[in-house]
Image (tube, rainbow, N blue to C red):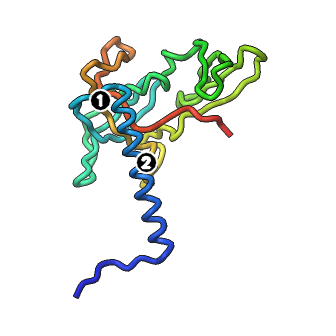
Amino acid sequence: MNRGVVLSTDDARQLQQLKRDVDQLKAEIQRTERKYNFVDSPEIWCEVISVAADWLVCRPLGLVDNTVSTFDFKVAKMLELQKTTTHGATIKTKDDDNETYTVSHDSDVTLQKRTLTKVSDSSTEVQVIVPRYVSRDTISSVVYPGSYLMARKPSCGTRTVDADGNQIPWIDVSPRAWAKST
């Protein structure tokens, strides 16, 4: 009689935490779908190959056989994570609606860092994208969440163009946000 796998208490706790993390990720993806009005849009899991200011170069990932295609395509970052839409802009943060900040993206090679300067007193806060986008060439044989993303193709487009002026039809819907750097 096969009773299956017996887990230690620590393994069982880790498995439960992983299940909660997956459920939380699914809920965040559903919120993003509602926010950007994705209706019957195709979705694809892919691996990050390289990172640019407003988009990523990705490859489709075969989830069944764990293979990676050799076909590269561009995926737009969410508008709030793009350099073009926020660099030099004055914004209000969700945390403190009474304050305005000027955004400047640092010239960091990975384009995942920005500085907010408070208009009222010129104090600054450095922020990074969490989780970071990590190209697969950066790491070897380690699974890091920032190396993978889910891309969707909204019917309304993404409003993002590449360096040649071509529309990028796919957008990253994986949960990412700006967070204070430590």
* Badge 2 amino acid: Gln
Marker disc for residue 153: none
Alpha-carbon neighbours of circle 1 within 10 Å: few (<14), some, or many (≥20)? some
Picture residue at 76% right of the left edge, 17% below the top = 122
- The residue sitting at the bottom extreme is 1
Quick one: quadrant of the N terminus? bottom left
Q: Quadrant of residue 78?
A: top left
Secondary structure at numbered mark 1: strand
Q: Quadrant of the C terminus?
A: top right
Three-letter amino acid code at the position of disc 1: Phe
Establish if 102 lies above or below 12: above
Q: Dot 1 corresponds to which residue?
A: 73
**x then y, percent, for residue 101:** 65, 18
Residue 83, x across and y down, in percent: 51, 20
Numbered-mark total:
2
Image location (x, y in percent) of residue 49 = 38, 37
Corner quadrant of residue 27 = top left
Q: Which residue is mark 2?
A: 24
Q: Nearest to the eye among marks 2 and 1: give it.
A: 2
The residue under the point 34% across, 32% down is 33
Q: Which callout, 2 or 1, points at the residue further toward the start of the chain?
A: 2
Query: Which residue occupies 46% across, 49% down?
Result: 144
Point 66% across, 16% down: residue: 100
Q: Position of residue 147 (x, y in %)?
A: 42, 43
Task: From the viewer's perspective, tell me whether residue 49 is left or right of residue 96.
Answer: left
Judged left or right of residue 42, residue 24 is right
Q: Contact (CB < 8 A) between labels 2 and 1? A: no
- Residue nearest the viewer, comparing 144 with 171: 171
Tell me how far mark 2 sits from mark 1, CA to CA: 28 Å
Residue 155 or residue 170, whichever sits in front: 155
> Which residue is outermost to the right?
121
Crowd rating for badge 2 (residues with CA inside 10 Å; few <14, some 14–19, many 20+):
few
